[in-house]
Amino acid sequence: MRFSLKLIAIVLCLASCVFAEVSLPAVLSDGAVLQRGMPIHFFGRAAPGEAITISLNKQSKSTTADYVGRWHLYLAPEAAGGPYDATVKGSNTITVHDVLIGDVWVASGQSNMEYPMEGWGGTPKQNLDEFPKANFPTLRFFQTQHAYSDHPLMDIPKPAKWVACTPETAKKFSAVAYYFAKNLIEKEKVPVGIMEADWGGSVAEAWTSLDGLSSKAGLMPIFANRATMMDKYVDEAEIIGPQEQRLKDEAKAKGQPEPSFPWHPDPHSWAPSELYNAMISPLTPYPIRGVIWYQGESNSAYDRAPHYAELFQTMIRDWRNHWGVGDFPFLFVQISAYKSSEAEHWGSLRQTQLESLALRNTGMAVTIDVGNPDDVHPTDKVTVGSRLALAARALSYGEKIEYSGPLPRQVTREEKALRISFDHAESLQAGKNGWCGFEVAGTDGKFSPATAKIEATQIVVSSPAVSEPVSVRYDWTNAPDCFFYNQMGLPASSFEASLPLFH
């Protein structure tokens, strides 16, 4: 017992030495945007037992650090406004300058969310045209660096900081998140803060906590996939890395161009929970309005796609649980059109994303019509960000606007045909290739091309090759080129649907 008490005393002494002064996490720094209409959460570290006072606008409140030096308190909600200075007083004083009250959104996912305004290997013309206009003092970005951890961290690794939007700083922002935020700034007239946490090539399980993953027995194959990957990585890593570097060094010595190599993922970006622990968990004490998400391409392989529906919905619930601010809007991009490889099936992955709309307060931006079949990173992020903003304006801000493309609601039997009823389907119209992309199948599961007949918000499909169809699918290939739209020009989602078991 004496040893245990002595050990505790040493730990407390070390904690007192390390956190002798009040400190704040990186996200509570100059230029921050705090969420309006919610209790404002301040938190940080200090010496154990230290008294801390927070002042913001006309509010002031005090608390005391706990036995390991952690402290937090909530101020009353504030309306949109600012800029203000926030003061944190303990044994030292910290002043956080230029604080705005507005709406805070998290932007996360893999490379299509990470894709910056300045592009990779060349700036898209639409972004070049945008830079001179990208002067929004009330739009702020907090961009996290790539980081991973095997346990949840309390702070975002430095040098993350809030940056105001200018024609120069906008070049580094996520293009999707920029166009999303610009739309909200212009329509809602409130400050907007984007906390950007993304990593190209990452899988959804890396962004989900271990609590979340372990809550579903059906997700256990994820850990088997991880074991298989690491077995391969251990076998090849000591060869691949040095071999690539040797070839680069040889080319440099000979004055030749640096060779390129096939892309392979950073093993940490595919490790269950490691990105959540380092890049999301430290943000969860910070109240937010909602999330925009663009990911799924790395989960489209045949051994991963079947688990994505349960995984993605688990991740959404997991984030909502850890943030603890209710079922905030979770708005996501359905992966686009890309030829990919025979080892992946993007149609199946898009279907799992469609099924995730079963969760409350979710919205999906369909993008198959603005993809690039030859490039996994389509450059038109204006359309993607704008479609996400439509969903936000409808679901989060309560505007009475159409925000979704046609979504299948029900399939019923007609004579030798199937009738599909759609939501969000006023004034259906075909794209440039006409009414194509539909297939039907009988009980044998063999799909054949089908013709489509439009009747108001319904579509009747049939094929002479299938006398008694029971299933229908649309735009099921990796890179479809058939699209149809509603009156707002929003495209229909690809889908697969079947008659009820008893009909």
Image: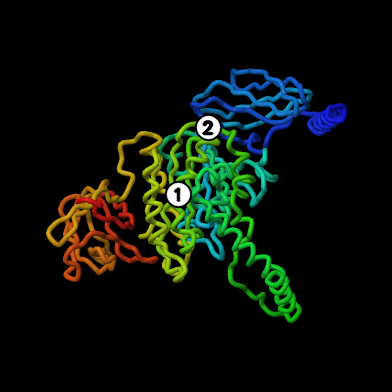
* Horizontal arrangement in the rendering, residue 454 relative to residue 483 (left or right): left
| Colour theme | rainbow
Q: Amino acid at mark 1?
A: Glu
The residue nearer to you, when weighing 39 against 79, is: 39
Q: Which mark is residue 236?
A: none
Q: Nearer the viewer, residue 379 or 284?
A: 284
| Residue 440 in view (yes/no) | no
Cβ–Cβ under 8 Å for marks 2 and 1: no
Q: Nearer the viewer, residue 502 or 417?
A: 502
Instruction: Give the percent coordinates (x, y) of residue 235.
Output: 67, 69
From this view, report whether residue 496 is shown above or below residue 399: below
Please give the name of the residue rendered at 27% of the width and 61% of the height, measured from the top-left corner: 431
Q: Is residue 95 above or below residue 334?
A: above
Characterize the local packing of mark 1: few (<14), some (14-19) or many (20 or more) Cα atoms within 10 angstroms.
some
Q: Amino acid at mark 2?
A: Gly
In the picture of the structure, the residue carrying the numbered disc 2 is 324
Q: How far from the left and from the top, in percent, is residue 9? A: 84, 28
Q: Residue at x 65, y 76 (%)?
A: 259
Tag 2 secondary structure: loop
Q: Which callout, 2 or 1, points at the residue further toward the start of the chain? A: 1
Distance, label 2 to label 1, CA atoms, is 21 Å
Q: Nearer the viewer, mark 2 or mark 1?
A: 1
Q: Quadrant of residue 446?
A: bottom left
- Rendered view: 3 above or below 214: above
Q: Residue at x 19, y 71 (%)?
A: 465
**Nearer-the-camera pick, 458 or 140:** 458
Q: Which mark is residue 310?
A: 1
Residue 142 is situated, as x and y percent measured from the top left of the image, at 60, 43
Q: Residue at x 55, y 36 (%)?
A: 322
The quadrant of the image that shows the N terminus is top right
Instruction: Estimate the x, y position of residue 169 in percent, counting from the top left.
Output: 59, 49
